């Protein structure tokens, strides 16, 4: 078995050598995910509204990270994905990142936007005009 630093030098082993910067950026993204998503989830608990499908959605959250992004949980998850892909540096993990973005957009965000429009109407439409989908 090769030491970790040796494996990263052999692209044939499924890993990509991106240099040392990737480790610092990868850990930064993981730490940002913990803080950002922790803050986002805390707001759901504090406002006592549902996060998961099937849970009652009582209020719209427009504070904290929701002032910067309509989808901070998904932004955080994509940041975590990218951070882990940089830490592990697999070729496919990095190449498939855009696929993850599209899957989240079409599989989660778009349906949630339709639901929130139906649930909150003009309040959500105003929020959507003021706050970007991603950032």
Image: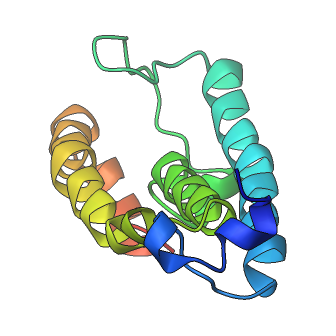
User: Percent from the top left, x then y, of residue 79?
Assistant: 58, 61
Query: In the picture provided, is 22 more to the left or to the right than 111?
Result: right
Query: In this picture, is 20 found above or below 73?
Result: below
38 vs 27, nearest the viewer: 27
Query: In the picture provided, is 6 more to the left or to the right than 47?
Result: right
Please name the residue shown 28% across and 38% down the image.
Answer: 120
Q: Quadrant of residue 40?
A: top right
Please name the residue shown 37% across and 11% down the image.
Answer: 55
User: Percent from the top left, x then y, of residue 11?
Assistant: 50, 78
User: Percent from the top left, x then y, of residue 15?
Assistant: 53, 69
Please name the residue shown 53% across and 55% down the image.
Answer: 81
Inspect this view and state whether residue 131 appears: no
77 vs 18, nearest the viewer: 18
Query: In the picture provided, is 83 more to the left or to the right than 114?
Result: right
Q: Quadrant of residue 37?
A: top right
Inspect this view and state whether residue 38 appears: yes
48 vs 19, nearest the viewer: 19
Query: In this picture, is 96 found above or below 121?
Result: below
């Amino acid at each position: 078995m090769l030491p970790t630093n040796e494996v990263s030098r052999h692209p044939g082993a499924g890993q990509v050598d991106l240099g040392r910067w990737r480790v610092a950026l990868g850990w930064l993204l993981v730490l940002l995910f913990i803080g950002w998503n922790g803050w986002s989830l805390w707001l759901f608990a504090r406002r006592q509204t549902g996060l998961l499908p099937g849970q009652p959605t009582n209020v719209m959250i427009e504070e904290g990270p929701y002032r910067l992004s309509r989808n901070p949980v998904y932004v955080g998850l994509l940041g975590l994905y990218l951070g882990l892909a940089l830490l592990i540096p697999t070729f496919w993990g990095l190449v498939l990142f855009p696929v993850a973005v599209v899957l989240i957009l079409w599989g989660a965000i778009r349906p949630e936007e339709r639901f929130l429009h139906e649930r909150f109407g003009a309040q959500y439409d105003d929020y959507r005009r003021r706050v970007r989908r991603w950032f």
